[in-house]
Amino acid sequence: MTNEPRSRSRTIVRRVLVILGFVVLIGLLFPLVGPPKEHPRRAETRSFVQGLLGSVKAYTAEYGSPPGGTPAQIMAAFRGDNPRKVLFFDASANRFNAQGELVDPWGTPYRFDVSKTDSPRVWSCGPNRKDEGGAAGSDDIVSWR
């Protein structure tokens, strides 16, 4: 009888130590697993948005003002239809629609706002294909966040 309480307390201590061991192990493994990865289409689109923003800035540095016109005209300027025939952006032909607009993985043309030379904006309408202007909470993929 005198050993029964001591045995029970040892069992409880062992269980607590095993549970603590699992908690520590999970804590050590979590950084290796990390948070879920971004969807490949969104990651690709984010890359294109940043590349297009860089093209706007490079074009502006070269010519003193950003390219104007429709998205198709802007893309033509980036692809060498400019005074010095400089290539600012290139993508495979299957990335363009019949109008010459670069389209995101969901088939929607990328959007440009070059009205402010010091802060141009480029965005994709995202998976829902609705232009929400990059509003907070929208699924738009934007260059300014």
Image (spheres, helix red, strand yellow):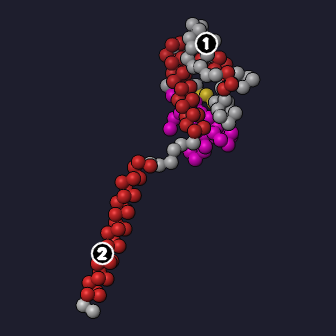
From the image, tell me which residue sits under label 1: 80
Closest to the observer, 2 or 20: 2
- Looking at the rendering, the stretch of residues picked out in magenta corresponds to 119-145
Q: Which mark is residue 49?
A: none
Across and down, in percent, residue 133 comes to 62, 38
* Residue plotted at (34% across, 60% down): 24
Across and down, in percent, residue 33 comes to 44, 49
The crowd level at tag 2 (other Cα within 10 Å; few <14, some 14-19, many 20+) is: few
Closest to the observer, 20 or 14: 14
Q: Nearer the viewer, mark 2 or mark 1?
A: 2
Using the rendered view, name the quadrant where residue 79 is placed. top right
From the image, tell me which residue sits under label 2: 13
State yes or no: residue 114 in magenta. Answer: no
Using the rendered view, name the quadrant where residue 91 is placed. top right
Kindly tell me whether residue 89 is visible in this rendering.
yes
5 over 125 or under it: above or below: below
* Residue plotted at (65% across, 41% down): 127
Using the rendered view, name the quadrant where residue 11 is placed. bottom left
State yes or no: residue 137 in magenta. Answer: yes
